[in-house]
Image (spheres, grey):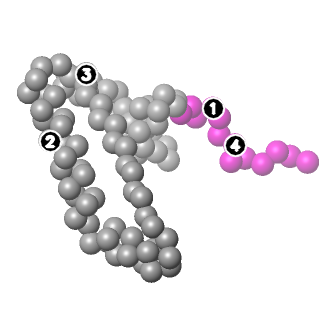
Amino acid sequence: MNQKVKNLIQKLGEAIHETVSESEDIAGVVKNIREQGFDVLLMLEATIGLNPADETEEAEEEVAEEAEGPFSSSDLSFLKSLRISVSEEGDTSETPEA
């Protein structure tokens, strides 16, 4: 990975940190917790993954083709990133006969 991309990733991390640090919502909740007598230590971990643009477009096209049923293409993309496949054969919505 070239130095320019590394610098951009570092800037992204800094931007995420600043956004969380300056969030009024987060500050309000932290204040409420402190009022209850607790100290707050907030640690967040961000994982940044990069794929070459060509592969990302192909993956999105594959997911768009598979987007049928109850899942949107975004749902399928997320599940695929977790290495979870969705098959229609596993439908358990039918109740067995007694």
At label 1, counting other C-alpha atoms closer than 10 Å, the crowd grade (few under 14, some 14-19, many 20 or more) is few
Q: Please state the horizontal and vertical placement of residue 86, each as a whole percent of the image.
A: 53, 33
Residue at image position (52%, 30%) is: 85
Q: Earlier in the sequence, mark 2 or mark 3?
A: 2
Q: What segment carries the magenta color?
A: 86-98
The reply to whether residue 32 is in sight is yes
- Marks 1 and 2, how far apart at CA: 45 Å
Indicate the quadrant where residue 77 lies.
Answer: top left
Pair 1/3: label in front:
3
Q: Earlier in the sequence, mark 3 or mark 4?
A: 3
**Whether label 2 touches label 4, CB < 8 Å:** no
Q: Please state the horizontal and vertical placement of residue 68, each as a whole percent of the image.
A: 44, 40
Q: Please state the horizontal and vertical placement of residue 84, each as a whole percent of the image.
A: 52, 31
Q: Which residue bears the numbered disc 3?
A: 55
Q: Which residue bears the numbered disc 2?
A: 11
Residue at image position (43%, 64%) is: 40
Q: Which residue bears the numbered disc 4?
A: 92
Q: Please state the horizontal and vertical placement of residue 75, each as a whole percent of the image.
A: 42, 43
- Marks 1 and 3, how far apart at CA: 28 Å
Give me the disc on residue 80.
none
Q: Earlier in the sequence, mark 1 or mark 2?
A: 2
